[in-house]
Image: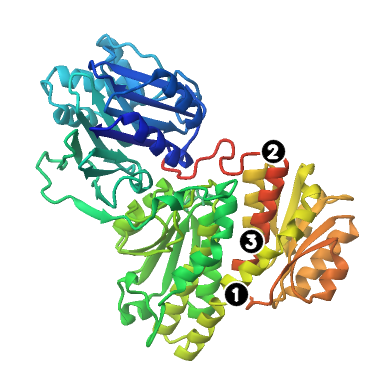
């Protein structure tokens, strides 16, 4: 969580810092701040609780003209969201400022040691030890050398971090480093830039440099970036990455919110992902970096992910087990990291992560890699840690997902999982090429089916009043549709703040049915599939107790039409692909309910999009 930016060059630093922070706000929005070196070499700090828009107003009033600075947008871990705990934090002299993303696990010990040495602290954060350690190092053994001072500083830290430091004694210089948290830098004729991810940099360059863990980069106002590795040696050719994201992809482009924009972008995102994937020999997926015989030998798959991406994992299991007949375990990364794991030399790990930076998912991948497992990533963000650390990575190419609630990445990741399952099924002989091609052509109909659901969003609008004042709702489904219920309920909780409990429909009678009383909303995902009649029975049980039933059903289903109070209709689809389409109604519904309640659909309370702490 938290986003950091830095700039030194010939332009006003605050312009990039604020624009960059606005782009990174999905990483946290509890507070925001900048430190800019003024032309007379003083550090000017502006920070406040709340959003980047509030910071922008304060910065406008402060008229910051300096050309070197750092910035931060915070998701609070240590210390409540407040002006005092907002970054940047400074040393005792007020001439050194630091911003940090991550967690310093030994901050209490360090604070105690620094206090004994006479340092004074002004915040409750773990981060504040960084400028004080830097101060000691800079004035002591590093003798005014920023790179050495940062190296000495991080040598004392435990935990995870990406850090940027500016010092009033060194106008036109910034130092940055990373250890377990993301950071990219860029060298341009107008100056040198740093950011937590490529999005802020897409507005200023098409080429970024990636830092490895423990690299330290010195950024200078002439635009140069010098990278030193953990041992202090010069990295002659830092890894570069071309950004093919158009900066305008991260703007609203006429939509009132990013969630609405991203929901409507789903058909095109899936079309991009499917383009050129069907070749002469089946599914083209060189990204797997596995030969046919290696694929055929896979006897067990772990899918590890968090949140919405975990729900993709549940669908991936159904598809892989159905098509490729390989046994799949789907694990919450945060649980997996502390559980026993059984792997063979033919176990494959698939991590699914939109951001590619979720700390728990990355830890799980590292653990499995350490056990000799091959790790394959399904991710959206180019150059993300997941993509860099995995043995192979499939980019879903959905474009920047900015709304905190994941929508287009969810459906595109399901399509990616389907492609992996088909690739595997052909390699291990469970499907013929003709069968794979048939499913692929069905996948090609998904974008139009989603367009059709989007055209029917008036159906979702009609049921908004049911949820606007409801304290709670039950979401039910069987088989692949239970996952659609989980994901629909998650969307409703996270953006509309309606408690929504999702349950496999058949399990409802073992407890949750007690919740139902007259008028209680039950969302039943009941497409025409092989468990349709069973789910219909559960809908009847809900109706018998007075539930208000909102069904997601397949066009032409008279039985459901007669039973439910409202129906959100989906076009006819193969039952293994219908989750990619049916969920769109539930995304749209959650967004409408949140908007009807006057909520900020893009930035729900307490959440951050990229969860980079465990
Ligand atoms: C919910 C949501 C989160 C993420 C989760 C994992 O709408 O977006 O549950 O899915 O934090 O994030 P990634 O996929 O980036 O690893």
Disc 3: which residue: 584
Alpha carbon separation for disc pair 1 and 2: 36 Å
Q: Quadrant of the N terminus?
A: top left
- Above or below for 107 versus 160: above
Residue drawn at the location 58% of the way across and 59% of the way down:
264
Dot 2, crowdedness within 10 Å: few (<14), some or many (≥20)? few
Disc 1: which residue: 576
246 and 418: which one is in front? Answer: 246
Residue drawn at the location 30% of the way across and 56% of the way down:
388
Mark 2 secondary-structure assignment: loop
Mark seen at residue 412: none
Q: Is residue 214 visible?
A: yes
From the viewer's perspective, is 207 left or right of 599?
left
Disc 2: which residue: 598
CB atoms at circles 3 and 2 under 8 Å apart?
A: no
CB atoms at circles 1 and 2 under 8 Å apart?
A: no
Q: How is the image coloured?
A: rainbow
- Above or below for 249 versus 50: below
From the viewer's perspective, is 262 left or right of 172?
right
Where residue 215 appears, x then y in whole percent? Answer: 20, 41
Mark closer to the observer (3, 2): 2
Alpha carbon separation for disc pair 3 and 2: 21 Å
Residue drawn at the location 35% of the way across and 55% of the way down:
386
């Amino acid at each position: 969580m938290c986003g950091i930016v830095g700039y030194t060059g010939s332009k006003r630093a605050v312009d990039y810092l604020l624009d960059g922070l606005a782009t990174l706000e999905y990483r946290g929005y509890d507070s925001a701040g900048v430190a800019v070196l003024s032309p007379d070499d003083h550090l000017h700090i502006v920070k406040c609780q709340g959003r980047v828009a509030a910071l922008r107003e304060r910065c406008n009033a402060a008229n910051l003209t300096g050309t070197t600075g750092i910035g931060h947008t915070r998701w609070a871990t240590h210390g409540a969201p407040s002006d005092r705990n907002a970054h940047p934090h400074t040393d005792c002299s007020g001439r050194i400022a630091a911003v940090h993303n991550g967690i310093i696990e030994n901050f209490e010990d360090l604070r105690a040691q620094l206090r004994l040495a006479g340092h004074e602290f002004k915040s409750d954060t773990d981060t504040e030890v960084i400028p004080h350690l830097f101060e000691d190092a800079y004035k002591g053994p590093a003798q005014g050398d920023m790179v050495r001072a940062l190296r000495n500083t991080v040598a004392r830290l435990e935990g995870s971090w990406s850090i940027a430091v500016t010092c009033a004694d060194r106008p036109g210089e910034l130092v940055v480093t990373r250890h377990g948290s993301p950071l990219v830098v860029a060298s341009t004729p107008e100056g040198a830039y740093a950011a937590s991810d490529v999005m802020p940099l897409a507005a200023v360059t098409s080429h970024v440099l990636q830092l490895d863990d423990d690299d330290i980069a010195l950024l200078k106002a002439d635009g140069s970036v010098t990278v030193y590795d953990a041992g202090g040696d010069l990295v002659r050719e830092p890894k570069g990455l071309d950004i093919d994201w158009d900066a305008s992809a991260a703007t609203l482009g006429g939509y009132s919110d990013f969630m609405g924009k991203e929901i409507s972008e789903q058909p095109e995102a899936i079309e991009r992902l499917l383009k050129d994937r069907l070749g002469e020999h089946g599914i083209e997926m060189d990204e797997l970096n596995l030969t046919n015989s290696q694929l055929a030998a896979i006897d067990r798959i772990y899918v590890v992910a968090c949140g919405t991406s975990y729900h993709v994992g549940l669908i991936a299991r159904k598809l892989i087990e159905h098509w490729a007949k390989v046994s799949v375990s789907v694990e919450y990364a945060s649980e997996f990291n502390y559980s026993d794991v059984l792997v063979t030399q033919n176990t494959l790990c698939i991590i699914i992560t939109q951001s590619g930076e979720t700390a728990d998912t990355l830890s799980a991948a590292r653990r499995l890699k350490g056990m000799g497992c091959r790790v394959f990533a399904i991710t959206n963000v180019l150059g993300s840690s997941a993509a860099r650390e995995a043995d192979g990575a499939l980019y879903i190419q959905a474009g920047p997902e900015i709304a905190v609630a994941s929508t287009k990445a969810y459906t595109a990741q399901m399509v990616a999982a389907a492609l992996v399952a088909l690739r595997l099924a052909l390699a291990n002989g469970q499907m013929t090429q003709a069968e794979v091609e048939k499913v692929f052509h069905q996948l090609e109909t998904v974008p139009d089916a989603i367009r059709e659901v989007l055209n029917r969003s008036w159906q979702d609008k009609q049921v908004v009043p049911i949820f606007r004042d409801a304290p709670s709702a039950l979401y039910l489904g069987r088989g692949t549709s239970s996952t659609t219920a989980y994901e629909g309920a998650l969307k409703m909780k996270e953006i509309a703040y309606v408690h929504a409990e999702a349950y496999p429909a058949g399990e409802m009678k073992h407890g949750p049915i007690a919740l139902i009383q007259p008028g209680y909303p039950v969302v039943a995902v009941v497409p025409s599939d092989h468990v349709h009649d069973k789910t219909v029975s559960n809908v009847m049980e809900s109706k018998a107790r007075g539930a208000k039933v909102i069904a997601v059903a397949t066009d032409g289903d008279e039985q459901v039409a007669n039973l439910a109070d409202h129906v959100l209709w989906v076009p006819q689809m193969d039952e293994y692909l219908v989750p990619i389409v049916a969920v769109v109604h539930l995304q749209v519904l959650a967004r409408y309910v949140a908007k009807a309640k006057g909520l900020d659909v893009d930035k729900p309370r307490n959440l951050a999009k990229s969860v980079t702490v465990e």
